[in-house]
Image (tube, rainbow, N blue to C red):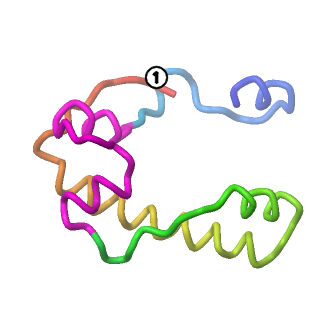
Amino acid sequence: SRTRALILQQWFPEVRNIFQLDLYFTTRNKLHLTSNRLENVCEVLGINDPPKTKLKPMLWKNAAYGNTKALEYIMKHNRIDTIILEKLYNKLKPFIVIQRSSL
C-alpha cells in the first residue's frame, strides 16, 4: 500500500500514474449475467482452455504457513487466471470503456 511504502521509504507510483481496468465492471454492466464470477463469465463466453481452477480457503491458510505444495498450486492458479483474463479481455475489448481511475 501507499502508506507502507512511505513508512519503509520505498518508491510507490504517484497518483494518476498507474491505471487499472477491472473486467468485473465490464461484465456486470455490459453482459447482465446472473453471476459475474470469472468462472461463470468464461463458461458463458466459451473460454475454457485452460480450465479455471478453484481455491479452497484451507489452501490459502496452508500457503500462509509456508506449505510448498499449497504455494505452488496458488502460483499455478494465478498463472491460469492471467491467461483466462487476457482471453476475456480480448473478447470484451469492443465493450470496454476505459475509465481513468488511478491506483
User: Callout 1: few (<14), some (14-19), or many (20+) C-alpha neighbours within 10 Å?
Assistant: few
Quarter of the figure with residue 65: bottom right
What residue range appears in magenta?
Answer: 21-47
In the rendering, at what x and y percent does residue 2 appear?
69, 26
- Left or right of residue 58: residue 46: left
Q: Where is residue 63 in the image (x, y as percent from the top left)?
A: 79, 63
Residue highlighted by disc 1: 16
The location of residue 57, given as percent across then percent down, is: 69, 55
Q: Left or right of 58: which side holds 22?
A: left
96 in relation to 71, above or below: above
Query: Considering depth in this image, is 37 or 93 the residue closer to the camera?
Result: 37
* Residue depicted at x 47% and y 28%: 17
**Is residue 13 shown above or below 62?**
above
In magenta stretch: residue 45: yes
Helix, strand or loop at disc 1? loop
Q: Mark 1 is on which residue type?
A: Arg
Q: Which residue lies furthest to the left in this view?
A: 94
Q: Which residue is drawn at 45% across and 25% down?
A: 102
